[in-house]
Image (tube, rainbow, N blue to C red):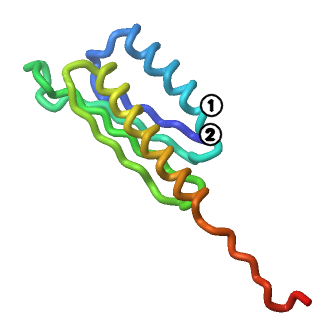
């Protein structure tokens, strides 16, 4: 599994980067069987003006279907936005894995005697 984090702004403090990196590692250990790649992008939409302008975009490429899950969140703080995005990503992954488990297994019975 590969990960790619683009911080996109110099306004990150060391504590936020450390917490985000730790949470990413925990997430990756837990869901490595379902995900091939995770990309995380942080951006500051308004620049130094403030407000609800911090954005986090998470793109996860799934192993089973080859599809992608894309999540975007906005907020005041990078850490808050990251946590919101990853909570939504986890819920989406749980829905996807439930769908995969509910698909019936097809057995080819032709040719068996």
Residue located at (50% from left, 52% from top): 96
Q: How many marks?
A: 2
Furthest residue in direction right, as rendered: 113
Tell me the quarter of the picture where residue 51 sits. top left
Please tell me the numbered disc located at residue 70.
none
67 relative to 27, above or below: below
Image: 12 above or below 72? above
Q: Is residue 2 above or below residue 84?
A: below
Q: How many other residues sit within 10 Å of disc 1, few (<14), some (14-19) or many (≥20)? A: few
Residue 74 place in picture, x, y as percent: 22, 32
Label at residue 29: 1
In percent of width and height, residue 72 lies at: 29, 40
Residue 50 on image: x %, y %: 11, 19
Q: Residue furthest left?
A: 49
Q: Quadrant of the C terminus?
A: bottom right
Q: Residue at x 41, y 32 (%)?
A: 86
In the rendered view, would you say 22 is above or below 56?
above
Image quarter where the N terminus lies is top right
Q: In the drawing, does residue 105 fall left or right of residue 67?
A: right
For the point 52% across and 57% down, the residue is 99
Residue sitting nearer the eye, 69 or 15: 69
Question: In the rendered structure, are the residues bearing label 2 and label 1 in contact, judged by CB atoms less than 8 Å apart?
Answer: yes
Q: Nearer the viewer, residue 47 or 26?
A: 26
Residue drawn 80% across and 90% down? 110
Secondary element under disc 2, as helix, strand or loop, is loop
Is 72 placed left or right of 96 in the picture?
Answer: left
x then y, percent, for residue 27: 54, 30
Under circle 1, the secondary element is helix
Which image quadrant is residue 49 in?
top left
The CA distance from mark 2 to mark 1 is: 6 Å
- Crowding around mark 2 (Cα neighbors within 10 Å: few <14, some 14 to 19, many 20+) is some
- Reading the image, the residue beneath label 2 is 32
């Amino acid at each position: 599994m590969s990960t790619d984090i683009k911080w996109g702004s110099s306004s990150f403090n060391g504590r936020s980067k450390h917490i985000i990196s730790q949470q990413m590692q925990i997430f990756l250990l837990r869901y490595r069987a379902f995900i091939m790649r995770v990309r995380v992008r942080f951006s500051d939409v308004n620049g130094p003006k403030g407000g609800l302008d911090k954005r986090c975009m998470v793109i996860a490429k799934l192993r089973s279907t080859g599809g992608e899950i894309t999540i975007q969140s906005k907020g005041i703080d990078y850490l808050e936005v990251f946590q919101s995005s990853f909570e939504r990503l986890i819920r989406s992954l749980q829905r996807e894995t439930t769908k995969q488990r509910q698909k019936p297994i097809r057995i080819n019975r032709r040719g068996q005697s």
